Image (cartoon, rainbow, N blue to C red):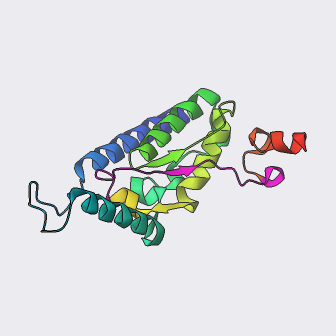
Amino acid sequence: MVLESWLQHLHTDFEQAFRRLKTEEYQPDKTPNTPMPEGETEADDNVEENIAQVEGFLHGDRLTLESVSGIPAAQLPPASMMQEPQAEELVEVMVAFMDEFHYKAEFPSEMPYLLRYKLLRTLWSEHTVPAYFWENRNTISNGMFVMDFCSGNAPECELGSYCPCLKYLDEG
């Protein structure tokens, strides 16, 4: 009963975080229909925007997911308290939130939701994402940051027996 109440409050917190995403819009400093300076083309402008996006991604500030969402990792219940259906519901909400600002979590399809939740819960406070994706979430024209949790070294991978690299070890 306590966990159900906890999860209900957490869902409310995520709803508020989604609303903030929708209302705290970044407005680019461009005036629509402004004539291009002589000698410049629309293509030149797009190249400059793309370079700015790459620079912002590579060299900009970094944020934790808890700072972006306003939901501290300590507010997320320990996985040991949850059942698979509860974890599935919470993982789907967390992943949907991340998707809103071009940050994608990828998991092996057969991985249980409790394990996915454990990874996301750790990620929430320990991993950083480019602040550029958050600040420009409504204007980014392409690209995303993908977290697949795979280290590339199957024996030490966080995905454990679900690591897709294991099949390559078996072949070798």
Q: Residue furthest front?
A: 39
Q: Quadrant of the N terminus?
A: top right
Q: Nearer the viewer, residue 65 or 40?
A: 40
Residue 28 screen position, x and y as percent: 21, 60
Residue 131 screen position, x and y as percent: 40, 63
> Is 172 one of the magenta-colored residues?
no
Q: Residue at x 12, y 68 (%)?
A: 38
Q: Is residue 31 left or right of residue 144?
A: left
Q: Residue at x 42, y 40 (%)?
A: 9
Q: Residue at x 71, y 55 (%)?
A: 151
Residue 161 screen position, x and y as percent: 80, 40
Q: What residue range appears in magenta? A: 136-156
Quarter of the rendering containing residue 130: bottom left
Q: Quadrant of the C terminus?
A: top right
Residue 56 against residue 75 in the figure, above or below: below
Would residue 70 be visible to someone looking at this image?
Answer: no
Residue 22 screen position, x and y as percent: 27, 45
- Give the number of marks: 0
Residue 11 against residue 67 in the figure, above or below: above
Would residue 91 be visible to someone looking at this image?
Answer: yes
Q: Residue at x 36, y 60 (%)?
A: 50
> Is 146 one of the magenta-colored residues?
yes
Q: Nearer the viewer, residue 22 or 6?
A: 22
Q: Nearer the viewer, residue 121 or 169?
A: 169
Q: Principal SS element in the magenta part?
A: loop
Q: Residue furthest top?
A: 85
